[in-house]
Image (tube, rainbow, N blue to C red):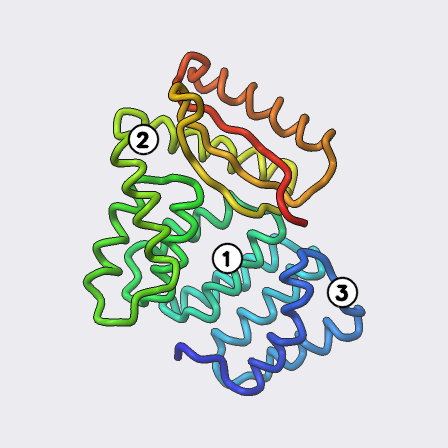
Amino acid sequence: MSLAQPKSGELLDLLTPSLTKGENLLSEFEIHRIIREAKKLPERYQGLSIEGLAKLVLGEIDEGCSLCERGLRIAPNDPVSFCNYTIALRNLGLHARQYVMIQKASDSLNPTILAEVATISAYWVDIDLLEKVMPMLTAMEVPRPEDMGKWYDTLNYLHTQKDHAQELKTIGRLMMNVAEKYRARLAGAHAFYVMSELDTLFVEVKTDDPVLLSQMNNALADEIIIAGLADSECVGCFEAGEL
């Protein structure tokens, strides 16, 4: 159940460029052909997943999400369906919705799914989720994921800044919500101490538009004040990342 079958793999290959770029690169005819073929797949969960991804490419977000999540309810431990969906959400700028899926999957017994959980929880400096999934991944008798060192680096950093870890997690959630509000496509993220004073989470936005970055940082400042963190030693900053 963990591998896409030949026909489903072919359909996913057609959708992948659009899902990666976060915009439709296919004709309406091509999309509807993919949907028709997806409905014929013998594994219903695969058909629902691919149909849902096609709807996301069309911009039919609610229906696309509903179909993908129906497929995951049938096969919750299928890494192909799960990772394709979470990556699609990220590239569409639906970061908060992606995080809901990550949280739900944190009890998965599939190492590929847990690796995705670790990647996203490290990105948003969620110490609680990292502390939950890292021991599970370590205990699994599978090859160590390539990014495992990065996850431990993030977790170790949060442990050294344990007095600030929960506030930094809150900053991450606020940044996630602002990024979703602007449907921003994101690149990397990193947290570190700035001038020995502030724990700062930097999130890279795939843009070269200084106006957009200014708007996002102003919106974040407002959210930080509303959250009662104006005097916190934790801050966040959106910056330009690789397009």
Check whether the beta carbons of the residues at disc 2 and disc 1 lie within 8 A of each other.
no
Q: Nearer the viewer, residue 68 or 240?
A: 240
Describe the element under mark 2 as helix, strand or loop: helix
Of the residues tagged 2 and 3, which is closer to the observer?
Answer: 2
Q: Residue at x 58, y 86 (%)?
A: 7
Residue beneath disc 2: 165
Question: Alpha-carbon neighbours of circle 3 within 10 Å: few (<14), some, or many (≥20)?
Answer: some
Residue 162's quadrant in the figure?
top left
Residue 3 vertical placement versus 81 (above, below)? below
Give the x, y percent position of residue 211. Answer: 74, 29
Check whether the beta carbons of the residues at disc 3 and disc 1 lie within 8 A of each other.
no
Task: Specify the label residue 25 is tagged with.
Answer: 3
Name the amino acid type tagged 2: Ala
Q: Earlier in the sequence, mark 3 or mark 1?
A: 3
Q: Nearer the viewer, residue 69 or 110?
A: 110
Describe the element under mark 1 as helix, strand or loop: helix
Name the amino acid type tagged 3: Leu
The outermost residue toward the left is: 139
Residue beneath disc 1: 86
Give the x, y percent position of residue 13. Answer: 62, 76
Q: Quadrant of the N terminus?
A: bottom left
Of the residues tagged 2 and 1, which is closer to the observer?
Answer: 2
